[in-house]
Amino acid sequence: MTTSPAPVAPPAPVAPVVELRGATKSYPGGVHALRGVDLTVREGEMLAVVGPSGSGKSTMLQIMGTLDKPTSGTVRVAGYDVGELTDAQLSALRARHIGFVFQHFHLAAGRDAVDNVADGLLYAGVPLRERRARAREALTKVRLDHRFSHTPNELSGGEKQRVAIARALVGDPRLLLADEPTGALDTASGEVVMELLHELHAGGTTVCVITHDNEIADALPRRVRFRDGEIVSDTCAGRVECL
Ligand SMILES: Nc1ncnc2c1ncn2[C@@H]1O[C@H](COP(=O)(O)OP(=O)(O)OP(=O)(O)O)[C@@H](O)[C@H]1O
Ligand SMILES: [Mg+2]
């Protein structure tokens, strides 16, 4: 007698972290930075956003991160329709779910590494003492425990970007958005930064990286290609399927 194999349950669907539907962004003077973008980024993905200068990559990242609003279309982050939230609710959403890393670091001059990172918890309602303790932990994660009291002008470019990554990860975000994080760095420092982003991804963080560097893009599981405010290709490999 043959027994039929036990039914295999289909894999549970992975929740989207960010969903853009028909997102457009226009500026006065007829600039159409985004011309109707549909993008779903699911929990645990790591993707590169690539495309020519002016094609709308940073605009999309700002909208994904709720730092900017689309002219039309909808944006959902962690299940919330961003268009329905007040500014205070948006700040809370960002503080709880999103970390940012920028090409030029955006660190506060004159504040040491610990306080720059501790500022990442400013809107999360964490008392100063705990903010600083968690900042020291985050700086240790990015291997800067020997630079706690250095101000930005006492740090190398690669170290500044590691401080910025520590600031982004100190709130334990689900989503890390990085706009050209290696753009201002030499190759070796850029590699260290990418290693850290890969480590965060391996730890479960969803990571979206804008890059001009094809080598970096090719090393990521998913690549979203932009041209003239539109996604022209979206290719995937690995465990999470893109739509
Ligand atoms: N505040 C603004 N007002 C008017 N036009 C803008 C504004 N911000 C961006 N743009 C325009 O929107 C388009 C997309 O800009 P965006 O910064 O998203 O490009 P990008 O793909 O990030 O380019 P790069 O690779 O050079 O950073 C560009 O043509 C830009 O000039
Ligand atoms: Mg840009």
Image: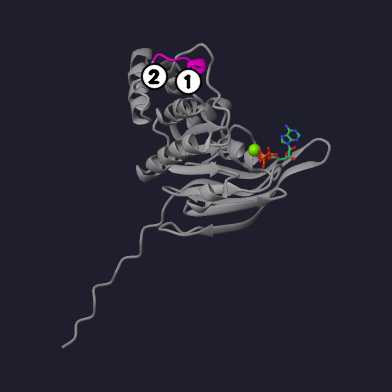
Given the image, on which type of amino acid does mark 1 rest?
Leu
Which disc number belongs to residue 236? Answer: none
Question: Residue 76 appears in which quarter of the rendering?
Answer: top right
> Label 1 neighbourhood size at 10 Å, few (<14), some (14-19), many (20+)?
some
In this view of the protein, which residue sits in the foreground, 59 or 52? 52
Vertical side of 114 occupied by 236: above or below: below
Q: Which residue is mark 1?
A: 155
User: Taking 127 as reference, is 225 left or right?
Assistant: right
Give the SS element for disc 1: loop
Question: Can residue 99 be seen from the camera position used here?
Answer: yes
Vertical side of 2 occupied by 175: above or below: above
Q: Which residue is mark 2?
A: 147
Residue 220: % across, % down: 48, 51
| Ligand 2 quarter of the rendering | top right
Question: Residue 25 appears in which quarter of the rendering?
Answer: top right
Q: Which segment is the magenta one?
A: 149-155
Q: Is residue 151 magenta?
A: yes
- Seen at 43% across and 40% down, the residue is 197
Residue 106: % across, % down: 56, 24
- Seen at 40% across and 58% down, the residue is 239
Q: Is residue 43 magenta?
A: no
Toward the left, the furthest residue is 1
Toward the right, the furthest residue is 29
Contact (Cβ within 8 Å) of mark 1 with mark 2: yes
Residue 194: % across, % down: 46, 40
Asked whether mark 2 and ligand 2 are closer than 8 Å, the reply comes as no
Disc count in the image?
2
